[in-house]
Image (tube, grey):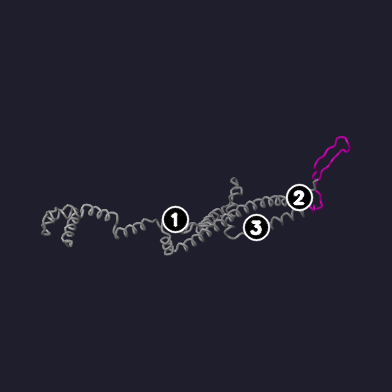
Amino acid sequence: MARARSPDRDKAFELWKASGGTMKLKEIADELGVSEGTVRGWKAKDVWDSQLYETLQLERSAPNEAERSGSVLQSEKSISWLEIETEYVTDIRKKPCTLKELSTKYGVPFDTIKKYAAENDWTGKRHKHRTSVAQKTAEKTAEIISDDIAKATARHFLLSSKLLDVIERALADPNEFYRIVEKLRTGYGPGEFDEKIVTEVVDALNDSKLLNVVNALEKVQKMQRQTLGILDEKDRQKLDIEMYKIMPQEEDEETEDDGFLEALKGNAKEVWKHDTSEE
């Protein structure tokens, strides 16, 4: 019948292992009340050196729960949530990026990024950003159109002004509507002939010329009224500014200062200030 295993045998190994294999065998023997030779025999038979090596290897390769938990927390803290959120919210293309794509791109678990996006309302923020961009684009487009209308209308009025100047000069001449212009030609046939323009003032009114001037004046006035009718107050102020820019200024002739220039500058400031506040 085999002898029962002594409990001191295992205790001896635990003492030696606890010391990292540095405790002397005599010290172990004295503590357990056995001979040093007995302890040396246990060490050889149970191969303490191999057991200690295997135990140390297992402990080194298997981190404890606290270390694993700390590693996970550190990983989540290292995620650049601001960068990921900015990319998601500001992507307003027809087919914007998805949470799945961002999960793959940044190496973040899909469930983690999905939870964070829901908690911080990424979908709502993207919708607000898209609405804001669309509104600013519409306002800028309207502003560009408004500026173009003002510039085109200013040129339109400049041309109208020139036409009115021609009519005014005609009306200033008392003989204009009594003057007849004819082309006279002398000499006929294959020989030499001569042509010249002859102007003559007669007593009878030139009805056709007067009618042409009246019709032209009516068309210019109608054209100006129609143009002014489609402009709101802001566009009219811009029109005044553009007209002032392109109208020729008479520097030689002194004119009375009626405050128009200062008022125009004031209107310009108000117009551009109003436009800036809208943006």
Residue at position x 80%, y 48% from top?
180
129 inside magenta stretch: no
Helix, strand or loop status at disc 2: helix
Between marks 2 and 3 in the image, the one whose residue lies nearer the viewer: 3
Residue 64 placement, left or right of 222: left
Q: What whole-number distance in Å separates the C-alpha atoms at marks 2 and 1? A: 87 Å
Judged by depth in the image, the label closer to the viewer, 2 or 1, is: 1
Name the amino acid, label 1. Thr
Q: Point out the residue furthest to the right here.
A: 189
> Real-space Cα distance between discs 3 and 1?
59 Å
Give the residue pinned by disc 1. 104
108 relative to 235 in the view: left or right: left
Q: Residues within 10 Å of mark 1 (few under 14, many from 20)?
A: few
**Amino acid found under the numbered disc labelled 3:** Thr
Q: Position of residue 49 (x, y in %)?
A: 21, 52
| Tag 2: amino acid | Glu
Marks 2,1: beta carbons within 8 A: no
Q: Nearer the viewer, residue 72 or 276?
A: 72
First to last magenta residue range: 182-208
Dot 1: element? helix
Q: Report x, y in % for residue 243.
A: 60, 52
Question: Which sits earlier in the primary sequence, circle 2 or circle 3?
Answer: 2
Category of crowding for the residue at label 2, using alpha-carbon neighbours closer than 10 angstroms: few (below 14), some (14–19), many (at least 20):
some
Q: Residue furthest front?
A: 1
Instruction: Name the N-terminal-most of marks 2 and 1.
Output: 1
Q: On the picture, is 82 further left or further right than 195?
A: left
Q: Nearer the viewer, residue 128 or 31?
A: 31
Q: Which residue is mark 2?
A: 176
Q: Quadrant of the N terminus?
A: bottom left
* Residue at 82 percent of width and 39 percent of height: 195
Residue highlighted by disc 3: 227
